[in-house]
Amino acid sequence: VLDLYFMPSSAAVKKLSGAFDAFYPDGFSPKKNPEMWEPRLLKAICSHAREGATLATWCVASAVRKAFTEAGFTIQKVPGFGHKSEMTVGRFEPKFKHRRSTTFLNSAEKPQSAIVIGAGLAGSAVACELARRGVQVQVVDAGPVGASGASALRWGVVHAQPSGDDNQLFRLTRSGLEMLREELLCYPELVRTEGLYQMARDGAELQKWQQQFAQLKPFSFPKDFLRLMSAEEAESKIGLKPRLGGLWHEGAGIVAVAEWVRARLNRSGASLLFNTRVGSLSKQGKNCQAKDAFGQIIAEADAVVVCCAAETANLLPGIELPLTRWKGRLSLLCEGALTDLKGAVTGPGYAIHSPDDWIGVGATYESADKQMSSEEAHCKNLSHLTDLFSQLTEADAAGFYEGFRCVAPDRLPVVGQVPAAEGFPNATGIYVSCAMGSRGTVFNELAAKVIAAQMFNEPIPLEADLLRAIDPGRFFKKPR
Ligand SMILES: Cc1cc2nc3c(=O)[nH]c(=O)nc-3n(C[C@H](O)[C@H](O)[C@H](O)COP(=O)(O)OP(=O)(O)OC[C@H]3O[C@@H](n4cnc5c(N)ncnc54)[C@H](O)[C@@H]3O)c2cc1C
């Protein structure tokens, strides 16, 4: 796995997390490019070395070799190649071990087996990512088939969430989309990512976007990622003229969510156990156990990943994850209602016309204590349609798709290893992936890759501050 950081090395080093196998410092000469060879920087980079990690560099400057030695490398000067007579090689053999937060520290401790509870977008992604690393995966779900929770959605939109200040949500959704690319290539028939139009909610938002683009805020986007688009140009892309101008997300679009989840569960090769509700989790020595409501063991493994949306909190009572459920309803329109629309459009709500003529408009956001009547929900959804396309004032609804989104107070997903808490002292080997909110399509793969990297003590494919932003430990106190 190679992660590329496009930024000064002093900034990149603050964003690294996880452990690396090989170090190859190659930044011009210390005289020409002193910042790259700063002993403090080299030591900070080397603090991410996995035990036994190797080092190689053409540079033999004594200050550089001293910095590597102080960082824990045993180094040697050996014959160089090309026009260099000597080079430096080394191996990470620290006298003092760093206390790392990862659970499985060396290859002997790598998990051989894992239980994934929940077979939705989050669980199916984790099952695939762990199976790819040779883990024996058992997926357990209370529903009768894969994708029977919120992921039962037939088609959903997938895109980044831009912001002029490059906030955490934008950075996370951008990474999420990038990490999905390879995955989505496996299912060409379930994916339409030829682009997605995001209409401005009103004139003020459009003006704000125009100013941000003019001032290159937060930076200049590649045209094949995001650009401003007039309503006229949007019409040529999506087949209907939207009320306002907006943004064109190239490479974003729609996915057939439930089919994707089921195809992925099959592809993972995991063993699948449906109609089985997990009632509690416990630890027996190093093993993690999933038990039913009567305390009978359903499955036992080295690690467990809880992907049960809002029910995740019930399986981890000691850590009190503050998750809430928000009901969402999407109005399904009768065939012929939006025939001219190609693909999807978002902005104030969203509308999808899929290649198989499924038409969804919505969606509502209903709290537990403020549910709408069916009529109110449909009216709300149709008002989004009129906001998007002023020429569409009515449409017949054939029914609803409804589900429950799981949301954390800060609206970011909750992903990663569960740290020990006062009410939950032994959390070793327990991970969660939930609180995807309305963005399960863009977050699930990123979440799975983070969890697998943590389990295997690999470099985490996410910047350190973003990792902290989604960490389950952000909500509760660590034990004293
Ligand atoms: C109306 C609506 C429209 C949406 N539109 C979009 C969209 O366009 N784009 C987008 O990205 N997202 C959208 N979403 C959000 C998206 O559906 C979710 O983010 C995503 O499906 C969450 O996936 P998940 O795997 O975390 O949860 P779920 O799909 O809910 O899966 C959780 C699974 O856990 C199982 N489970 C729970 N408790 C237990 C237990 N104790 N034992 C065993 N199994 C258990 C459940 O049976 C379920 O299968 C929409 C949501 C709604 C409601």
Image: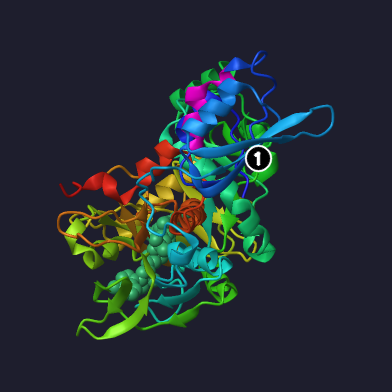
Q: Is residue 44 covered in magenta?
A: yes
Does 293 sit above or below residue 67? below
Q: Secondary structure at mark 1?
A: helix
Mark 1 residue CB less than 8 A from any atom of ligand 1: no
Q: Is residue 215 visible?
A: yes
Q: Which residue is located at x 65 percent, y 62 percent?
A: 355
Q: Is residue 209 covered in magenta?
A: no
Q: Main secondary structure of the magenta part?
A: helix
In the image, 339 versus 21, the foreground residue is: 21
How packed mark 1 is, by other alpha carbons closer than 10 Å (few <14, some 14-19, many 20 or more), is some
Taking 119 as reference, is 57 left or right?
right
Taking 131 as reference, is 81 left or right?
right
Q: Which residue is located at x 44 percent, y 62 percent?
A: 122
Does 275 sit above or below residue 403? below
Q: Which residues are magenta?
A: 35-46
In the image, 377 versus 200, the foreground residue is: 200
Q: Which residue is located at x 68 percent, y 43 percent?
A: 237
Taking 247 as reference, is 473 left or right?
left
Asked where in the image residue 96 lies, by quadrant, the reply is: top left
Ligand 1 located in image quadrant: bottom left
Q: Position of residue 207 (x, y in %)?
A: 50, 21
In the image, 430 versus 398, the foreground residue is: 430
Q: Position of residue 160 (x, y in %)?
A: 52, 42
| Amino acid residing under circle 1 | Glu
Scheme of colours in the image: rainbow
Q: Position of residue 333 (x, y in %)?
A: 49, 62
Q: Is residue 229 visible?
A: no
Q: Position of residue 454 (x, y in %)?
A: 44, 54
Label 1 sits on residue: 235
Looking at the image, the residue that sits furthest to the top is 31
Q: Which residue is located at x 23 percent, y 46 percent?
A: 475
Asked where in the image residue 74 lies, by quadrant, the reply is: top right
